[in-house]
Image: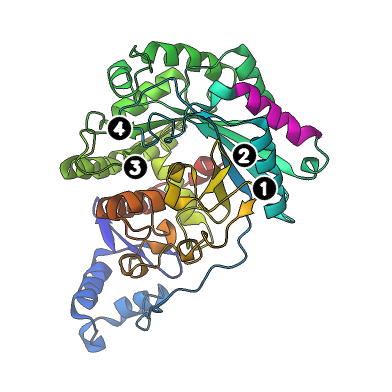
Amino acid sequence: MFTHHDYWYVYQVESGDAYRIGSDLACIMRKIRNAGFIKTEEYEREMLDSLAELRLFKFQETYPDRLPRIKNHTVTGLSLNVAQKCNMNCVYCYGGQGTYGNPGYMSEQIAISAINLLIDLAGDKTDLKLIFFGGEPLLNFPLIARIVRYTETNEHAKLKKFHFSITTNGSLFNREIINFLNRFKFSVTVSIDGDKTIQNQNRPLANGKKSYGVVRHATRKFLKTRNGNALGRATITTDCTDVEKISTTVARLGFKRFDYVPVTSERSALYALSDFQYRRLIQDLDRQAEEVIHNSKNGRSGTNIRIIDMLHKLRSPHKKSFYCGAAKSFMAVSTTGNLYPCHRFVGRADWIIGNIEGIRSDRYTDNFTISGIASKTCETCWARYLCGGGCMYDNFVFSGNLFEPDPRNCAEIKHRIEMAIYVCDRLNEIEKYLE
């Protein structure tokens, strides 16, 4: 139960239902929560009937000592590190300036073998996803073009429907690349941290020169060809915490959608967020919620999808057992052909789970066959079915444990859920945001 702007809300964990309730009912529920029991004669029958209608009476929940294994994984997506090199030198890069400890380019032989492995692992599934990643993947654009054409011409691959996406720093768009990405309907994410001061400071070119002008020129050219249909994504660091300013900058470049992620790092890193900055970032979700409501009432969509993304999750009929499909429905392939749980683990020898010849059962450990909400922290958390335990890589960097999340990430997700519930209540026509 939580309150926002004098509105009281209840989220029912097991059903996923959310309700706005009156202050009188909220008072009763606070007493129940604090006392741990209820003496029915103390409360008006009307209030008890309201509680019953909301299905909030429930036997004490019990949690198993060990959550069931997840069986029958079907891999339907691969992230291909086609280039473990980069033309930028981002200060917070977790991939060793894009090299992941082993600089180079993926060969066509490894790429084709990876696609064939994906087809085999997918079994009867027909919709498959290929993500091109780096480093800067467009440094190896000729290979990307050959891979896509392979999916069109190979008899085995033609039986599947491939969906393509790419994450790029936005500096290498040219006419050939733009036409290709549009022709094959690529989903495109451009990593950009904001205005020229922040972009040049956090994401300089590898030769030490400023990157903002290059990215601004190339990205604008690209966005004009697809009416802004791409995601601008910022990394929030200690020098880059003004989400509203970043969002405005990205929108002016022509992006229709914007999102951000707090930097993943050791707490001692110079660019790491302080606890105070993290709290300010969480507080900004209140502003973002009001922005969503304002834009809706004025017939505008807005660019920031942070709250919108959570609205999708709230409306999903499925409970999340995992934060994402890493090592389950999705894996990453390095330039050398090794398999990893996802692109963020590439280059970490301890996390190799196979290669293009197949998954190694001796490396595919219990870590990837139990629920993401297996820890004591998560299994009793009210947000568990919308969160799924948090990003395994973020958890690992924070605690050395895939299933022990950073409390600051937990606080951000919980408040985002609360703001999404608030937005759902305040808008009559939220469907326009879920198209």
Q: Is mark 2 on a helix, strand or loop?
A: strand
Q: What stretch is highlighted in magenta?
A: 141-153
Left or right of 151: which side holds 67? left
Q: Residues within 10 Å of mark 1 (few under 14, many from 20)?
A: many
Say whether marks 4 and 3 touch (CB < 8 Å).
no
Say whether marks 1 and 3 touch (CB < 8 Å).
no
Q: Is mark 3 on a helix, strand or loop?
A: helix
Q: Residues within 10 Å of mark 4 (few under 14, many from 20)?
A: many
Q: Position of residue 185 (x, y in %)?
A: 65, 30
Q: Mark 1 points at which residue?
A: 118
The answer to which of marks 1 and 3 sits earlier in the sequence is 1
Say whether marks 1 and 2 touch (CB < 8 Å).
yes
Alpha carbon of mark 1 to alpha carbon of mark 2: how far? 9 Å
Dot label at residue 243:
4
Alpha carbon of mark 3 to alpha carbon of mark 2: how far? 33 Å
Q: Residue at the spot x=47%, y=32% of the render?
A: 299
Magenta region, mostly helix, strand or loop? helix
Alpha carbon of mark 4 to alpha carbon of mark 2: how far? 30 Å
